[in-house]
Image: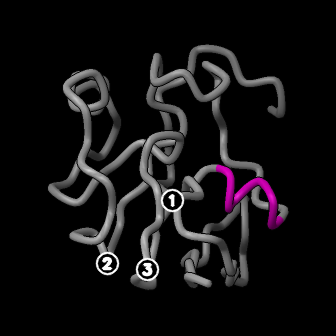
Amino acid sequence: MTKIIFLPHEELCPEGQLAEVEPGTTILDAALANGIHLEHACEKSCACTTCHVIVREGFGSLNEATDDEEDMLDKAWGLEPDSRLGCQAEAADQDLVVEIPKYTINMVSETH
């Protein structure tokens, strides 16, 4: 099992969260399965940036980003070199530390 540590986020997981997942699980699926309601406006189809995350540790162990993901990331708020879309980034056998950015670019949010 791979551990994903979600750093504290003011709204989504104020205390942070530890998730244990099988390799091949996306960061988004790990978040959702552990009660972290990370936005995913396009329903995991790599067509938006609402599930943008920053991988603080373990970035090199993730599957490689596709050109489509890279194109979408260019539109993400707070883009960093270790940014990925949670719906596309799959955990491997190395533990991860993930930060959820404070904001997303989402014109309509059903939870707010």
Tell me if 43 is positioned left or right of 87 in this view.
Answer: right
Q: Residue type at mark 3?
A: Asp
Sequence order check, earlier mark of 2 and 1: 2
| Residue pictured at 68% horizontal, 51% vertical | 29
Give the Cα separation between the discs numbered 2 and 1: 15 Å
* Residue 8 in picture, x, y percent from top left: 60, 77
| Residue pictured at 54% horizontal, 68% vertical | 23
- Label 3 sits on residue: 93
| Residue pictured at 32% horizontal, 75% vertical | 56
Residue closest to the eye, 46 or 109: 46
Sequence order check, earlier mark of 2 and 3: 2
Give the Cα separation between the discs numbered 3 and 1: 21 Å
* Residue 44 in picture, x, y percent from top left: 60, 29
Sequence order check, earlier mark of 3 and 1: 3
- Range of residues picked out in magenta: 29-34
Residue 31, compared with residue 84, is above or below; it is below
Instruction: From the image, give the main secondary structure of the stretch colored magenta.
Output: helix
Helix, strand, or loop for circle 1? loop
Q: Residue type at mark 2?
A: Gly
Q: Residues within 10 Å of mark 2 (few under 14, many from 20)?
A: some
